[in-house]
Amino acid sequence: MANRFIVEADGGSRGNPGPAGYGAVVLDAASGEVLAEAAEYIGTATNNVAEYKGLIAGLEAAGAIDPDAEIQVRMDSKLVVEQMSGRWKIKHPDMKPLAARAQRLFPAGRVAYQWIPREKNKHADRLANEAMDAGKAGRQWEPGRSSAGLAATAPAATPGGSATGVAAALEVPAAEPLAEPKAAPVGWAAPADLGAPTTLVLLRHGETALTPQKRFSGSGGTDPELSPAGRRQAEAAAAALAARGTIQAVVTSPMRRCRETAEAVATRLGLDVRVEDGLREADFGTWEGLTFAEVRERFPEDLDAWLASSKAAPTGGGESFATVARRVAVARDKILARYAGRTVLLVTHVTPVKTLVRLALGAPPESLFRMELSAASLSAVAYYADGNASLRLLNDTSHLR
């Protein structure tokens, strides 16, 4: 039986347009448990843009937990609910690509939309205001203490329906199909009408002492430094990126091996380094420091479960791939909002790089096991204004030879 989630989303603008932000929360439909929260300050935007971006963030967070779930979306925006339900036309050019992006995240048959009054949408509204307050203070929103266990704020809607009486009480224009998803751009140039893409160049950190031994090395272990070979790899990557001359910002995982790799590149390019916690490697629990064979010998059933499902976590409190995907998607959206139209170097780890590639391609979770990603390799994904993404490079190690 499919999981059933409730997504509550909201967005706001202090000025309309003005400083704007969104908030979204994913709840378990049966228990009301909070499964995920997302919020972001998005700069100057309208209320409607912020509301749509909140919807997208909530659907992405739900998809990171279970891409096959059934979703009920609850929002206090009649515009978004009616447009996404297909009953109102989408006329504004800023809304069409956002609606198309939201539509692509889940098949229409697995998402129902319900309007709720603002007082029933307090959780998402609070998150949106926290994001705007953070933006006013010159920082990005960071998740606070989990509010797991809070009850859902409104009764469930009937399957496939939205708030009873909303459409009947309004003179609803003839429905217009949502904008069809555009094919991903072909080649290296962005279509003129979409403007310059935001390009994330993904650099896996250089080797540590654990890398050649193929040991699990995540965020729950010893946080090793680069080995001499890893430092040489970082310098080689720095030289290659300097020669290309396209990097405009450097963002790194907080792990030592990534910060050392990022510093090597940033020093060569004359840029500062920004740390993003969401880019850290998965926590592998009690598997940290072990080889695959050692894990197979000690935890065979747990390993089989981990290989079979993105929701299974390593033994001893590690992170599942679904959990990692959720925080990586949030970090990605923060970076895309901050560096729109620019080329940004992300220095991170195997799992986050593969996750970003998987999400860009719309590939299933098991694809993570089908990608090769070498130490100090380069990959790249371009993100366009219509919500499409284009994988441009994967596992390039030519600079190391």
Image (cartoon, rainbow, N blue to C red):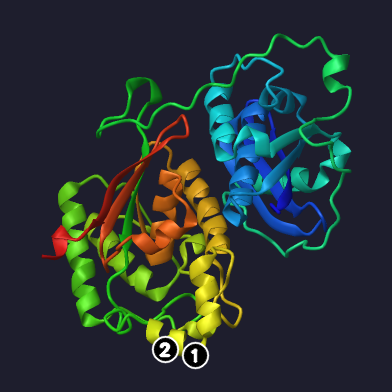
Q: Is residue 164 above or below residue 336?
A: above
**Callout 2: SS:** helix
Q: Amino acid at mark 2?
A: Glu
Say which residue appears at 29% left-offset and 53% top-offset: 379
Whether residue 349 appears in this view of the structure is: no
Q: Is residue 77 above or below residue 224?
A: above
Percent of width and height locating residue 153: 86, 47
Work out which residue is located at the far front of the displayed protein and give it. 1
Residue toward you, 327 or 367? 367
Percent of width and height locating residue 314: 54, 77
Q: Is residue 142 above or below residue 193?
A: below
Q: For the residues labelled 1 and 2, say whether their Cβ atoms are less than 8 Å apart.
A: yes
The circle on residue 14 is none
The circle on residue 294 is 2
**Callout 1: SS:** helix
Picture mark count: 2
Q: CA distance from mark 1 to mark 2?
A: 6 Å
Residue toward you, 63 or 341? 63
Can you tell which quarter of the image residue 297 is in? bottom left
**How many other residues sit within 10 Å of disc 1, few (<14), some (14-19) or many (≥20)?**
few
Left or right? Give the position of 243 relative to 382.
left
Percent of width and height locating residue 38: 64, 50
Left or right? Give the position of 300 relative to 116.
left
Q: Amino acid at mark 1?
A: Arg
Q: Quadrant of the C terminus?
A: bottom left
The circle on residue 298 is 1
**How many other residues sit within 10 Å of disc 2, few (<14), some (14-19) or many (≥20)?**
few
